[in-house]
Image (cartoon, coloured by chain):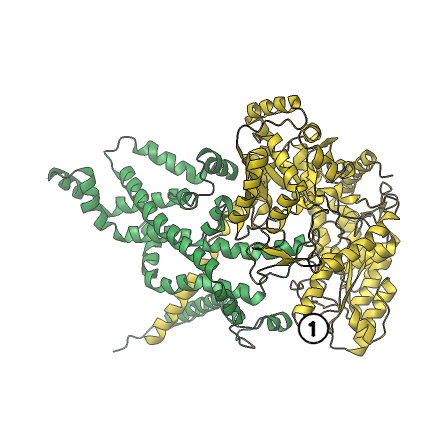
Amino acid sequence: MKRRKLLSLFLVAAMVLTMAGCGGKSAADAMGEEQPDTAQTQEQEPETEGDAQEAAEGESSAAQPAELDTSERVDLVFYVMGDAPDDEQMVEDAINEILLEKVNATIDMQFSTWTDFQQKYSLELTAGSADLIYIANWLNYGQLATSGAFEELDDLLDTVAPVLKETVGETNLDMCRVEGKIYAVPCAWAEYVCNGIKYREDLREKYDLPVPDSLENLEAYLMGIKENDPNQGLLTVTTEESQGFLTGFDAAWVFNLKYPWVNANGLPYGLASDYDSPADVYDYWYSDDFAEDMKLMKKWADLGFWSKSALSDTNNSESYKNGLCVAEVAGQNPNKQITALQDFKNDGHDDWKSEYIAYGEITNTIYPGHATQNGTAVVRGSKNPERALKVLEILMTDEEVNRLVQYGIEGVHYEIDDQGIYHNLEPAHPTFAYEGFNTWALRNGEFKLPQETDIVLNEMFDKYEKLGEQTKFPNVNIYNGFSENYDAYQAERTAVSNVMKQYLAPLQAGLVDNVDAAVEEFRQKMTDAGIEICRDGFKEQWAAYCDEYGYK
Amino acid sequence: MKIKKAGTTVVFEVITYALLAIGSIVCVFPFIIILSGSFTDNTTILTQGYSILPRDFTLSAYQTIFRAPRDILQAYKMTLYYTVVGTAVGLFMITLTGYVISRKEFKYRNQVSFLIYFTSIFGGGMIPWYLMYANVLNMKGSTFAIWFPALMSPFLVILMRTFIVGSVPDAITESAKIDGAGHFTIFIKIVMPVLKPGLATVGLFLALGYWNDWYRSSMFSTNSLTWELQFYLYDLLNATTALKQMTQGTGISTAQLPTESVKLAMAVVATGPILLLYPFVQKYFVSGITVGAVKG
């Protein structure tokens, strides 16, 4: 009897657990189905707001520079990504005090949170309740602009915000052009996100190994550590940083050491072109180079540079920090190097040293982030587009306001030391962190306060800037301004993606018995999946893009 | 005296228990992993992976959470509020609706029922739903938007109606009517007391729905003070992954992200209390599942 009770209790507990676990699922499923509709609705949306908008446009063309009618108070909404800081209200109040005085307007920041942010971002544009909105290429800026989600800013910038136009600069604004029109204002600060290799300088010195600046040297570096300390993990590569249409496995990022591609890992669908001749697209997956490269991957896998279960591993984010690997090759950038330096210091690993080498340094293809990486747009349907743009101008070009919106209130949230370096006053649990509103698009190089870590970062940026000047297109990020429209070949694209996961990933992870046979099989499956259709579609759009911007 | 069981019965029972036992182990196992992981040192999780019993036992994850418990307690408070208010109001409305469409003297009951049933098959879709609450009813940002949209569910109305039809014979209400009772008196004094198991079931479904919901917070909250508990947890995980991916493209510091063991401890803190509550209400649950069923 007693045992029976126990068992039934156990079963009940089991049921309870399954029930509790099932809760949110249906909502998530439903969302997945609904998503494709979002884009369509957006296109229709402006019509519903037509009247207000026409009226607004009429006003704008009539307005003269610096003669903005501010007699009526307006309350604007600024939609940004991520989570709100604790002291949101306090900082907003401080900003609004100034804004009311200057242009009789207030601003309310609204946050997307990081849950379903893509979907909520589209919904926000559909609903049209915001006035200003953060834009980025990873939020489909190009496509949204084409479908009419944002106000055209060409005229407005001249009439309402000439100072803003000057601060940001013509070249930057031009990069935000979609079909010839400006829809967004980028930030006024060049950031270098050049991918590269992060490696342990202290181990390199200790065992007297070469700097991993080529495939041979990287191999020698890893081999050297393996020979001296067989228990040390070398690379924790997985498929996590290789989710798009460029690579299937993280280790394949090392080929950026070899090819001067226009973009890290080349172009989608196994295509590639060089930075110096972006429009000159050639084939990579079906080339002999590719087969050779895969043989190298097999060799490295056989040498035990990464785990045999690398394809199914997921947990790689903290292994470098904890000394479980001696280099990271995929998805790295100067900021991650800074984070690593900080981590080593915080964890008490004072004798560990992290170094960073950008792929572009070796192949001479250094370029900064694209202007559309961080920008602000005026939402079409906003009842006060001029005032919104004026407020944006103040947020970016007024030193006091810019400091407030980026760093909070001096003396409460942060202080500046003798060297002009930013320090948060509550580093353990900040109520307003550095760039606490996530307004990366409002960065203005002139007013940007360096953090302690930025000293190293700025040194790196200075170095990259000089290198970037020597390229054929000085300091121009070519690839990231391009946005592909794949509606016409969505089905083939999905099939290609599946083949990449199934055949390319093991190939690039070197986990195949016979490389030549596996390469052949992979190519065959790719052809079957319809790679040619994707490639044709992509090439056509890419050629048009290169033509439009003169990347020859 | 013991009754002897036939051989086949014994075999049947052995197989049944074995299957159920395996099923329960499969269900319980992940939770044990979460529990033990939350007591394990973070570096140990990263270097050696998860285990059934915690290696390197530590309470540090819980200490981290409860050092600044304000956020999680606030989320708890809000979820309790949504659950209590939503369940009470929802139960009231569902019962009333179910009662009305079960009454034969209500002339348009078929039309009204159809309107309700229709929405259980055809929905307007997510975007109209969102626009309705955000732009038309202007509820975005208020706590109202969190509990209001879930008050009525066609499934629960149907369940309630079936239950009322099955357990309240017309003769009872008719006799009350002859004694001079009005509609409301009949409902409160005659019908409600008979409905207790039905109320418990529907109430439980509603409460569970509110407790587990995160989606409406995600859609309509503009202030983290109004977040539901599940959304608070979900967003914590999402923020971690999003920021990790974002750092590829933009410069954001990842130093402040929660560690593995803290995430697991969060899950325990969030699900623990409701798990303890279950054994006490589970009998209603079981009866509830059979309420709407056709009895032979």
Parent chain of label 1: A
Q: Could you tell whether A334 is left or right of B186 in the image?
A: right
Colour yellow maps to chain: A
Residue that badge 1 annotates: A349
In which quadrant will I find the N terminus of chain B?
bottom left
Q: Could you tell whether A362 is left or right of A449 in the image?
A: right
Say which quarter of the image contains residue A125: top right
Q: Percent position (x, y) of residue B280?
A: 33, 63
Q: Amino acid at mark 1?
A: His
Residue sitting nearer the eye, B229 or A394: A394
Label 1: how many residues lie within 10 Å, few (<14), some (14-19) or many (20+)? some
Colour green maps to chain: B
Q: Percent position (x, y) of residue B256?
A: 60, 61
| Image position of A288 with respect to B38: above or below | above
Residue A474 visible in image: yes
Residue A34 visible in image: no
Secondary structure category for the residue under label 1 = loop
Q: Percent position (x, y) of residue B71?
A: 48, 58
